[in-house]
Image: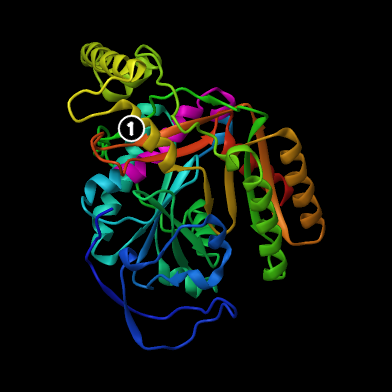
């Protein structure tokens, strides 16, 4: 991905072992310079993370009462709302190398100081669009990193290369968890834009079918360290969970190498037309145009035939390779396909670790995974794809974790 060339001087943040701020010489910070990890297990190595500047910002959003919306069968709208902020910021800052995390019913992004006002506008527009297009309340906030450290937490970042073309941000230090809690308490809130506002959501789509588990189930998992727990024991537990996943068929990948099948052009058409248009007439025209466009895409993907420079088969293979189905965001978050026996062993490990005061966790089992795509150009290989469970995934796992807390 192209680099964003803004530079900011910072003091080195907390070390990986002490977690306390230490004075040091100023060094330039660019997210583009953060080393890319190629083994996912390395995200558990705190020495791989670098501190984020105090002058940067954390942009967050989350769908209020997302679990209820999922219970009402609106999981696709919840996922779209969570991915919309990432899409809108990418479009508002073309060429920027963005650090972001998709959370199923929300998202987190890092923002350099010079882009703060642009992202604030995107946040407010996204909240309005989600309310008007999907009848969901999207909470949004913009929190200074300095506030994280004033609260006694840290914010450190690494980047994991899912493929040669796409990488995803990983966070440690408790800063994202603090920012999420602050947002839910109403701190640093960004008000919604006036009615009718809409950010640029070019490339945001959800046009692929749910992918059934090939041999077992799809497990969504969130495992967070307990306050004051022995860090080495926590990391050993999380490492054992990753080892269980890696030993399962396909190393837990929920999507086949050939990518998921495309949904038929009429699937979700009325809801999508309603989201795009405001007047009845415009919705009708929008729906007709969508059907034609989607019908052509459905035919191309179904036949697998290239069209000019575009190869549907290549796109779907890249989709599977680029998929974001595992992350580290102040804890381990996975949506993986695995046998029932593997899920049982993972849950048993987590239960023992929770009894020992090492972790808090939430899990949710379902029979399929869904993917939400951000693909501004089908001719490039750096399109990104967020995987979640088809029956609420991360949101249901988070609800279980909350009940256990």
Q: Provide the major secondary structure of the magenta segment.
A: helix
User: How far across and down, in percent of the image, does residue 245 sit?
Assistant: 64, 46
Q: Is residue 251 left or right of residue 312?
A: right
Q: Residue at x 24, y 36 (%)?
A: 377
Q: Residue 339 in the image: state x and y as whole percent.
A: 70, 34
Colour scheme of the rendered structure: rainbow
Residue 293 % position (x, y) = 24, 17
List the residue tagged with mark 1: 315
Quarter location, residue 212? top right
Q: Residue furthest left?
A: 308
Query: Does 72 appear in magenta?
Result: yes
In magenta, the rendered stretch is 69-87
Q: Where is residue 320, by image quadrant?
A: top left
Q: Is residue 109 left or right of residue 19?
A: left
Q: Residue at x 27, y 24 (%)?
A: 276
The answer to whether residue 82 is visible is: no
Task: Give the class, few, some or many, for how many residues have Cα within 10 Å of label 1's Cα (few <14, many ≥20).
Answer: some
Q: Quadrant of residue 396?
A: top right
Q: In the rendering, at what x and y percent does residue 235 appear?
A: 66, 63
**Vertical order, 70 against 156 (above or below):** above
Residue at (37, 72) in percent of width and height: 53
**Residue 197 sits above or below residue 142 on the image:** above
Q: Is residue 276 magenta?
A: no
Looking at the image, which residue is at 45% across and 26% down? 260
Look at the numbered disc 1 and give the secondary structure of its residue: helix
Q: How many marks?
A: 1
């Amino acid at each position: 991905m192209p680099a964003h060339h803004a530079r900011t001087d910072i003091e080195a943040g907390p070390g990986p072992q002490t977690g306390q701020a230490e004075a040091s010489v100023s060094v330039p910070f660019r997210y583009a310079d953060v080393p890319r990890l190629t083994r996912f297990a390395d995200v558990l190595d705190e020495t791989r993370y670098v501190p984020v500047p105090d002058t940067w910002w954390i942009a967050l959003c989350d769908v209020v009462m997302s679990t209820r919306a999922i219970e009402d069968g609106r999981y696709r709208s919840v996922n779209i709302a969570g991915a919309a902020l990432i899409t809108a910021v990418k479009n508002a800052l073309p060429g920027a190398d963005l650090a972001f995390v998709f959370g199923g019913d929300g998202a987190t992004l890092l923002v350099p100081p010079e882009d703060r006002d642009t992202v604030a506008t995107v946040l407010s527009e996204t909240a309005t669009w989600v309310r008007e297009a999907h009848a969901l309340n999207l909470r949004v906030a913009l929190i200074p990193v300095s506030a994280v450290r004033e609260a006694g937490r840290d914010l450190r970042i690494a980047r994991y290369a899912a493929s040669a073309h796409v990488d995803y941000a990983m966070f440690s230090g408790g800063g994202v968890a603090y920012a999420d809690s602050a947002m839910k308490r109403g701190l640093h809130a960004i008000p919604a834009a006036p009615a009718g506002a809409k950010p640029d959501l070019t490339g945001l789509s959800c046009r692929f079918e749910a992918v059934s588990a090939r041999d077992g189930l799809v497990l969504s998992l969130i495992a967070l360290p307990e306050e004051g727990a022995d860090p080495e024991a926590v990391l050993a537990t999380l490492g054992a969970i990753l080892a269980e996943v890696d030993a399962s068929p396909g190393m837990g990948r929920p999507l086949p190498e050939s990518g998921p099948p495309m949904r038929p052009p009429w699937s979700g058409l009325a809801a999508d037309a309603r989201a795009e248009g405001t007047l009845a007439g415009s919705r009708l025209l929008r729906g007709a145009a969508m059907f034609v466009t989607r019908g052509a895409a459905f035919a191309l993907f179904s036949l697998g035939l290239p069209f000019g420079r575009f190869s549907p088969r290549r796109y779907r293979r890249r989709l599977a390779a680029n998929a974001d189905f595992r992350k580290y965001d102040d804890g381990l978050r996975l949506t993986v396909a695995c046998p029932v026996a593997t899920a049982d062993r993972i849950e048993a490990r987590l239960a023992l670790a929770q009894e020992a005061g090492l972790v808090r966790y939430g899990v949710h089992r379902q029979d399929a995974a869904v993917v939400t795509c951000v693909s501004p150009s089908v001719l490039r290989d750096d399109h990104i794809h967020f995987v979640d469970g088809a029956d609420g995934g991360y949101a249901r796992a988070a609800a279980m974790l909350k009940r256990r807390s």
